[in-house]
Image (tube, rainbow, N blue to C red):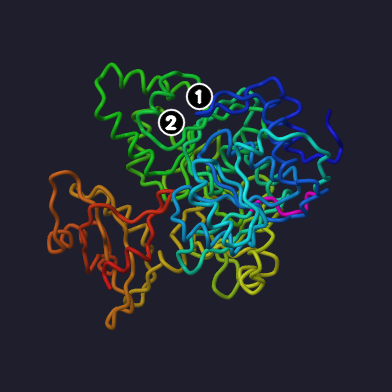
């Protein structure tokens, strides 16, 4: 029976006990199963204590049932969930455990051999998900909404990764905003293929689905053939992914025989929403996916510290190259370097305010103060607003290149270079240069059988770009360096030209 003190997520689940919550490699599980398993996990974590009072529990499991039930168990025990990345090496896992000052390390048996020695050496309590999910029941604590719920570590592209602390109230605001904007219902069925140490997979897909009483199908890892197989079945209503995933799905569709292509496209058309995020969506990918699926991908903008802030509309115009308008309950503005609001059409830094914004960087008060200005979170992303729609120009630190007295958007140059017949994908960076301040450099992946040299690229670029935007250095690479979300790691690209 529902208790007034329970977290809203738990209260919502009690309304849908007989419905299927999770379909995973381990099987299909109802909301009743999830409530029972998470209560058992919470009891095991408490181990006789009344409340874990925001103690950090670092946990790792392959995407699936163990992950979901463990996450909910951590929350119900009053602790803060610190998801560990299954793709990270032991040194990075150890860094997060130590930096978060985790009281408990909770691991799926598949990761026991790696995590147990780290936990024991650090003097942390070590538990297996297979044990805690089978535990008994105990009285669970009242968890205040202001308490920390989630600590996700940033990618660390500009320094050591930082723990971003999101409260239960922040999480609820992020989810409620997306549920309203994207019209989630209990009849939805979403396919989750994204990593579960990142806000995109945790909040936008998993938690939105479970908040709504919907079903979340979880694949253990992204596999293009497995995704198409699910889509062809025609039962899915939502799919969210990153641009590189859509590019791989397009490649499989292109290679399929005509009869299967028809089934694949028909499966897409039965869905109501397909979303792209976590990295800039190339316009050519949007156009090709629309040809294949009938869907204009909904592009949105967010980050670990704020959840989602901007989105193209579910119903209405979705503009290629734009990330839409502010989401419900989110305040957004664009400011210049002196903190003044810029005129429409002028570039400035995106700042966000509202209940979705995170509480703090874990034990980094100076870093936390630095990113806020008069209560507004400074994202570090530069954008322009055109007719109310936001267009991202890039990160202030890595995507805005100062060359020859001009400020240039690397993302704008990349969008043009992708139209070159030899270029499959590219990344543009600015590298320190005595003459130009920064010189524009391009790293490119080529199409099969293609070749390209700088003296061939530059004449072509002059027909499409202003002279000061033309790349002055070129590196051809087999694969651009990317993180787990498929986002190109610009600092690593810059090192190619050092």
Q: Which mark is residue 461?
A: none
Look at mark 2 in the image and give the residue it sits on: 295
Residue 325 in the image: above or below residue 163: above
- The picture places residue 25, in percent across and down from the top left corner, at 50, 29
Label 2 Cα neighbours within 10 Å, binned few <14 / some 14-19 / many ≥20: many
- The picture places residue 210, in percent across and down from the top left corner, at 65, 33
Asked whether, in this view, residue 370 is left or right of residue 487, the answer is right
User: Which residue corresponds to the image point at 66% horizontal and 35% vertical from the top-left?
Assistant: 133
Which of these two is toward me, 118 or 441? 118
| Marks 1 and 2, how far apart at CA | 14 Å
Which of these two is toward me, 466 or 121? 121
Residue 30 belongs to magenta span: no
- Mark 2 or mark 1, which is nearer the start of the sequence? 1
Q: Which mark is residue 236?
A: 1
Q: Quadrant of the N terminus?
A: top right
For numbered disc 1, what is the local secondary structure?
A: loop
Residue 310 in the image: above or below residue 34: below
User: Which residue corresponds to the image point at 64% horizontal and 70% vertical from the top-left?
Assistant: 364
| Corner quadrant of residue 379 | bottom right
Label 1 Cα neighbours within 10 Å, binned few <14 / some 14-19 / many ≥20: many
User: Which residue corresponds to the image point at 78% horizontal and 54% vertical from the top-left?
Assistant: 53
Q: Which residues are magenta?
A: 144-150
For numbered disc 2, what is the local secondary structure?
A: loop
- The picture places residue 55, in percent across and down from the top left corner, at 72, 56
Q: Is residue 387 visible?
A: no
Asked whether, in this view, residue 247 is left or right of residue 394, the answer is left
Q: Quadrant of the C terminus?
A: bottom left
């Amino acid at each position: 029976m529902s208790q007034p003190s329970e977290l809203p997520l738990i209260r919502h689940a009690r309304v849908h006990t007989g419905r299927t919550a999770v379909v995973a490699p381990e099987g299909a599980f109802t909301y009743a199963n999830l409530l029972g398993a998470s209560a058992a996990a919470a009891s095991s974590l408490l181990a006789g204590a009344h409340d874990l009072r925001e103690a950090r529990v670092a946990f790792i499991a392959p995407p699936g049932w163990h992950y979901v039930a463990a996450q909910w168990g951590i929350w119900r025990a009053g602790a803060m969930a610190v998801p560990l990345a299954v793709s990270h090496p032991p040194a990075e896992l150890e860094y997060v455990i130590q930096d978060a000052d985790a009281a408990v390390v909770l691991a799926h048996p598949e990761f026991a051999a790696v995590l147990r020695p780290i936990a024991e050496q650090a003097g942390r309590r070590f538990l297996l998900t297979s044990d805690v999910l089978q535990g008994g029941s105990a009285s669970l604590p009242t968890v205040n909404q202001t308490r920390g719920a989630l600590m996700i570590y940033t990618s660390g592209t500009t320094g050591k990764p930082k723990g971003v602390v999101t409260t239960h109230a922040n999480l609820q605001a992020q989810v409620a905003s997306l549920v309203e904007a994207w019209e989630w219902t209990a009849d939805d069925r979403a396919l989750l293929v994204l990593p579960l140490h990142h806000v995109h997979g945790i909040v936008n897909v998993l938690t939105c689905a479970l908040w709504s009483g919907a079903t979340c199908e979880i694949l253990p890892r992204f596999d293009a053939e497995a995704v198409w197989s699910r889509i062809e079945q025609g039962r899915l209503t939502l799919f969210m992914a990153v641009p590189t995933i859509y590019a791989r799905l397009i490649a499989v569709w292109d290679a399929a025989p005509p009869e299967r292509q028809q089934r694949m496209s028909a499966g897409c058309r039965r869905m109501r929403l397909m979303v792209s995020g976590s990295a800039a969506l190339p316009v050519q990918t949007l156009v090709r996916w629309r040809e294949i699926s009938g869907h204009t991908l909904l592009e949105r903008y967010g980050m670990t510290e704020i959840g989602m802030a901007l989105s193209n509309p579910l119903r209405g115009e979705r503009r290629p190259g734009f990330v839409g308008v502010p989401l419900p309950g989110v305040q957004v503005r664009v400011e210049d370097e002196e903190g003044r609001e810029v005129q429409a059409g002028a570039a400035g830094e995106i700042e966000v305010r509202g209940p979705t914004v995170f509480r703090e960087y874990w034990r980094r008060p100076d870093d936390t103060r630095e990113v806020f200005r008069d209560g507004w979170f400074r994202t570090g992303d530069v954008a322009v607003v055109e007719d109310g729609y936001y267009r991202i120009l890039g990160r202030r630190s890595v995507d805005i290149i100062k060359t020859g007295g001009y400020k240039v958007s690397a993302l704008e140059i990349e969008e043009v270079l992708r139209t070159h017949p030899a270029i499959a994908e590219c990344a543009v960076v600015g590298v320190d240069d005595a003459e130009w301040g920064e010189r524009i450099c391009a790293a490119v992946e080529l199409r099969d059988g293609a070749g390209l040299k700088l003296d061939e690229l530059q004449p072509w670029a002059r027909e499409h770009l202003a002279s000061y935007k033309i790349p002055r250095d070129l590196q051809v690479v087999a694969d651009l360096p990317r993180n787990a979300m498929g986002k190109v790691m610009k600092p690593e690209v810059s090192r190619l030209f050092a």
